[in-house]
Image (tube, helix red, strand yellow):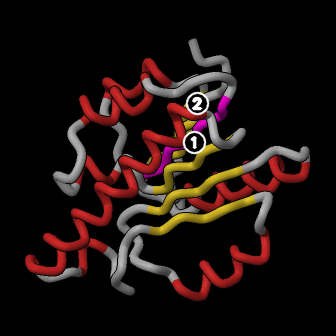
Amino acid sequence: MATGIVRIFYGEGHGKSTAALGCALKAASEGKSVFIIHYLKGRMEEEAQFMKKLEPEIKVFQFEKTDACYEDLSAEEKKEASLNIKNGVNFARKVLLTGECDLLILDEVLGLADAGLLANEELENLLKSRSGGMDLILTGRNMDASIREYADEIYKIKSEK
């Protein structure tokens, strides 16, 4: 059974990914290895270039090939992007099974259900596959109630103004 912490940052407000990145920086400063997998955000080239400076402690993985966010793509582009995103989910599964890092951040993974790319049951199975003491952070706008039981900490990010 997994002993690491599962945190969820969700909600309509800005700052979910930033909160996850703060956890990544803290973990890296403690000598831990961190993997971040981005979903639905496109390539984010400027951010990706900056994040490369944080390697090898923090490694960022992006499987999408377009610059645009998933929601802004045409139907044809979404078809191709969905295959790349599924590759990203499979990579996350591998990392969870092998315990390849100390902290795994699945940025916007909760949005995959909203986009019809990952059923909540598949996300639950992904969470069940976590091994060892790996910490896990999930982010996204919406969180299905079925995911709550897998979390040790849940933070709802909401804009007040």
At a point 27% along the width and 34% down the height, the residue shown is: 122
Residue at disc 1, secondary structure:
strand
At a point 59% along the width and 37% down the height, the residue shown is: 136
| Percent position of residue 4, x then y | 67, 25
Q: Is residue 154 left or right of residue 20?
A: left
Q: Main secondary structure of the magenta part?
A: strand
Asked if the stretch drawn in magenta spans residue 88, the answer is no
At a point 76% along the width and 48% down the height, the residue shown is: 33
Q: Is residue 77 left or right of residue 25?
A: left
Identified by mark 1, the residue type is Ile
Asked if the stretch drawn in magenta spans residue 135, the answer is yes
At a point 30% along the width and 66% down the height, the residue shown is: 84
| Percent position of residue 43, x then y | 45, 79
User: Which residues make up the magenta segment?
Assistant: 134-141
> Are discs 2 and 1 less than 8 Å apart at CB?
yes
Above or below: residue 100 compared with residue 145: below
Pick whichever, 161 or 26, lies toward us: 26
On the image, which quarter does residue 19 sit in?
Answer: bottom right
Callout 1: few (<14), some (14-19), or many (20+) C-alpha neighbours within 10 Å? many
On the image, which quarter does residue 88 sit in?
Answer: bottom left
The residue indicated by pointer 1 is 137
Mark on residue 6? 2
